[in-house]
Image: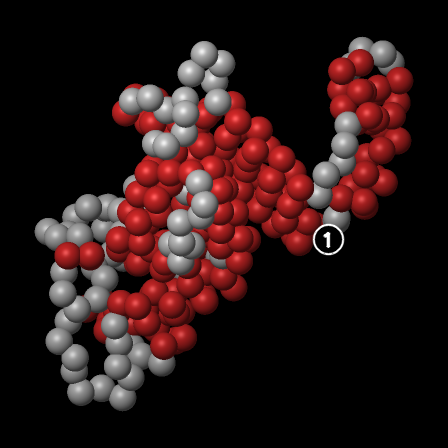
Amino acid sequence: MDTPYGSAALPVWERPEPQPRAAPVPLNRAKIAAAAIRVADEHGLDGLSVRKIAKELGVGPMRLYDYVVNRSELLDLMVDAVYARIAEAGPQPGWRATVLDIMHRTRAAALDHEWFADLLGARPHLGPHALAVGEATAAALSQAPAVRDIDDLQRTLGALNAFLAGALRREITERRTARATGTDLSAWQAAHGPYLQRMLATGRYPTVARLVVDGAHLDADETFRHNLTTVLDGITEREGA
């Protein structure tokens, strides 16, 4: 399943499902994607394999190749299944509420399926549900007062998506590190606090000292909400717009 991306004559979205065969376990692409998501949730993308997915489904590995021709197509199906959950959000009262709802739903989906964040910004997401989320986001942002033309909309979408990918990858990396090391934030602070205090006491890092001593220590939910609001304010309410 390591054929280069785009090698298929038609994208998986445009190819009909294979004809059903007489088999103890019926298959379709949605069922394969759901099984692959369960495997990735448990083992990560590095642990995702045809053999594990086939075992999860109770079929032989070669049967999967009737439905997906390579790993990229499998990832496309998995990603779009997650976008289907995000796309369940209906329009909110106003463009800003719609964008915020989509961003928070995306974060919730990524926290449930950590591998999803690894693929944000790393590959084009062109499935029907991904396109629906993209359409809803772009349509809402196009109503922002400062978004006056298509160039403004492109820049605004780019900035918002860059923030989202970076914020989610950082949060999930921290979660993975805490699990791998068995060290939570309190334990990390206890281990490194004395060293940091000695360094800050030198007076060479006054701004860092202010951030550490006086800065608000927000939890992950508050941090995401606050930073998202700040970014959205900055890219959609420019002075003179």
- Compared to 19, does 11 lie above or below? above
Q: Residue at coordinates 62% horizontally, 35% vertically from top-left?
A: 226
Q: Residue at coordinates 49% horizontally, 54% vertically from top-left?
A: 109
* Quadrant of the frame with the N terminus: bottom left
Indicate the position of residue 93 as horizontal and vertical percent values: 45, 45
* Secondary structure at numbered mark 1: loop
Q: Nearer the viewer, residue 218 or 3?
A: 218
Count neighbours of disc 1 (C-alpha within 10 A) and say few if under 14, some if 14 to 19, many if 20 or more.
Answer: few
Q: Residue at coordinates 57% horizontally, 46% vertically from top-left?
A: 172
* Quadrant of the frame with the C terminus: top left
- Compared to 188, does 238 lie above or below? above
Residue flagged by tag 1: what amino acid is it? Gly
- Compared to 184, does 230 lie above or below? above
* Left or right of residue 94, residue 108 in this image: right
* Left or right of residue 200, residue 229 in this image: left
- Compared to 67, does 217 lie above or below? above
Give the number of marks. Answer: 1
Q: Nearer the viewer, residue 192 or 14?
A: 14
Would residue 181 be seen by someone viewing this image from the given angle? yes
Q: Quadrant of residue 86?
A: bottom left
Q: Quadrant of residue 118?
A: top left
Indicate the position of residue 138 as horizontal and vertical percent values: 34, 37
Indicate the position of residue 179 as horizontal and vertical percent values: 66, 54
Would residue 72 be seen by someone viewing this image from the given angle? no
Residue located beneath label 1 in the image: 182
Q: Residue furthest front?
A: 93
* Left or right of residue 60, residue 94 in this image: right
* Left or right of residue 8, residue 218 in this image: right
Q: Residue at coordinates 20% horizontally, 57% vertically from top-left?
A: 12
Indicate the position of residue 51 as horizontal and vertical percent values: 36, 69
